[in-house]
Amino acid sequence: MRKILSRASLVLMLIITLAIPRLTQAQSGLPQECDQSSLPSRDLKYPANQLILICRPPNWNGDLIVYAHGYVPPQAPLVLPLQELILPDETFVPEVFLTQGFAFATSSYHKNGVATEQASQDLLDLVNYFESLVPVGSLKRVFIIGASEGGLVAIQLLEQHPNEFDAGLALCAPAGGASKQIKYAEDFRVVFDYFFPDVFPFGAFDVPSDAFTQWESIYVPRITAAITRDRRATSQLFSVTRAAVDPTDLKTAIETAIDVLFYSIWGTPDLIATTGGIPYDNRFTIYLGLTNNLALNLQVERIRGDRQAEDYARTFYQTTGDLDRPLVTLHNILDPIVPFEHELIYRALVAREHKSRFLTVLPVVGYGHCDFTTEQILGAFALMVQQANVQTH
């Protein structure tokens, strides 16, 4: 659960995982209490089995921690999220939980890319499978933890299945819902194209299915050169989009642009295929932030969304704020990928449902996406368990 892999690291991971077979348990150095296996998919459209990891200590306390991983590019093979489970000090998270008596389980899901709907069902199946492995009635509580896209999965499971999950921890999550997150990423793309029209030879939703193969060789250098070359246009880009940068480090402007645009190039074809169309519409969006906004609003790419796709996103990728179990969220204030504004939106949703007593938001000062220390992550986890204990008693 350390900082989610950088885009460059993801590309390297793709190369490595495509080139070598999946590691065995002995090769990967997993604790001896952990077993890897798979569960069949119920999905005819995405029939691949989900890969699962289950760890159970001999002194099991009856509690299970389920981890929902973050976004993985659809071009990558299905793998367990082992890299996400390494803390900043190189501690392997399941080992920490095992020493405290908790069981632990996680999944690859049976689909990469946009997968909130699929992930929710997969994790419910995982909990049911775990329960079939232990004596009847021995499973006392289930805690759900998720990072980034997995944080959205965690929140939705906690909202929709309060009888199955006792508390949750969402790290750097798009808590305000995927529609808000899609709009942020796509607004950044079309505004970027207005200021830097020579970087991408295609529109925001006309991304060729093989464009990702040129990400490192062509598009990353172009983005870097554009941001570096024209400081005035760069300043205007961030003024309009309000994407996060560290004002003390100008290199973060490049990092933010690369990180946000990564999803456009790697994820757009999958987003369209999964939702059944274009879940974004900016025909009536008014972009502000410049001294003269007229030219921007006249010339920026305008996109008509598909009602079916927008409805899909609102149905399967939206939170409600209807909490009946404790939820702790941890989020960098200057998050370039999932803006901290999601926390404010979700807090308002929870207040509207009169459930504020169940929500604790922990802001983390600084720039980064899921850029937390070991102490911050374990402290948030301890708080979640404490709140669950209070509710139980």
Image: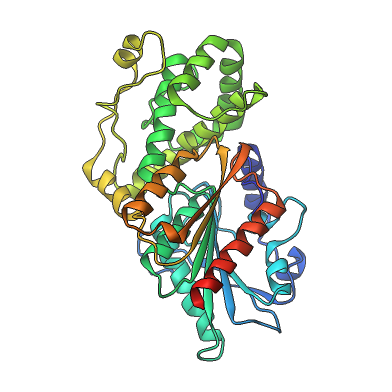
Q: Is residue 58 visible?
A: yes
In the image, residue 113 lies at what x, y percent?
A: 47, 49
In the image, residue 158 lies at what x, y percent?
A: 43, 64
Task: Give the mark count.
Answer: 0
* Left or right relative to 297: residue 122: right
Q: Residue at x 50, y 22 (%)?
A: 238
User: In the picture shown, does residue 325 fall above or below 276?
Assistant: below
Q: Residue at x 60, y 46 (%)?
A: 370
User: In the picture shown, does residue 153 fall above or below 16?
Assistant: below
* Left or right relative to 19: residue 42: left
Q: Nearer the viewer, residue 373 or 21?
A: 373
User: In the picture shown, does residue 293 fall above or below 93?
Assistant: above
Q: Residue at x 57, y 30 (%)?
A: 256
In the image, residue 31 lies at what x, y percent?
A: 74, 71
Quadrant of the rendered image containing residue 358: bottom left
Quadrant of the rendered image containing residue 59: bottom right
Q: Is residue 367 visible?
A: no
Looking at the image, the residue that sits furthest to the bottom is: 136
Quarter the N terminus occupies: bottom right
In the image, residue 287 lies at what x, y percent?
A: 35, 21
Looking at the image, the residue that sits furthest to the left is: 307
Q: Residue at x 29, y 54 (%)?
A: 315
Colour pattern: rainbow
Q: Nearer the viewer, residue 12 or 329?
A: 329
